[in-house]
Amino acid sequence: MLVHIDPASDAPIFEQIAASIRADVVSGRSHPGDRLPAARQLADALDVNTHTVLHAYQALRDEGLVELRRGRGAVLTDAAGALGDVREDIVALAAKAAAAGITPETLSALIKEAIHAQY
């Protein structure tokens, strides 16, 4: 798993780490049941604080994408597999919206409205 961060970015590093892991899942490079690198190992590789990596892992846990297991580390959940499926649907929806002349802002508002209606 390759995790990319941009130290010059305005986005917090923990968010960049979480986004990079999500991107690996969506692309199919990572799958449910895969272990994420140990927090210390990833922190050393990225030259960041271990707590920054743990913060990213906790954010992914809160989203339901990662299960943190004592002694086993961070493991991708079955919800991670669903993320890739949803991405395919979103790509198709975005193409259909673009063909219909719907702006990204309008499409985003429609998606948010539909999500809120589900809860």
Image (spheres, grey):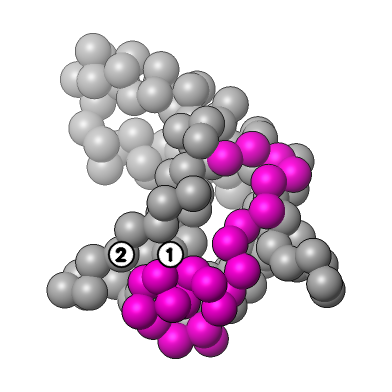
Foreground residue, 68 or 82?
Answer: 68
The amino acid type of the residue labelled 2 equals Ile
Vertical comparison of 84 with 21: above or below: above
- Look at 16% across and 74% down and name the residue there: 8
Asked if residue 84 lies left or right of residue 90, the reply is right
Image coordinates for residue 60, horizontal then vertical, percent: 60, 62
First in sequence, mark 2 or 1: give its number: 2
At a point 34% along the width and 34% down the height, the residue shown is: 107
Does residue 29 belong to the magenta stretch? no
- At 37% across and 64% down in the image, what residue appears? 16
Which residue is farthest right? Answer: 70
| Residue that mark 1 sits on | 17
Do labels 2 and 1 touch, CB within 8 Å? yes
Reading the image, the residue beneath label 2 is 5
Q: Secondary structure at mark 1?
A: helix
Bin the neighbour count of mark 1 within 10 Å (Cα to Cα): few under 14, some 14-19, many 20 and up: many
Relative horizontal placement of residue 37, taking residue 32 as reference (left or right): left
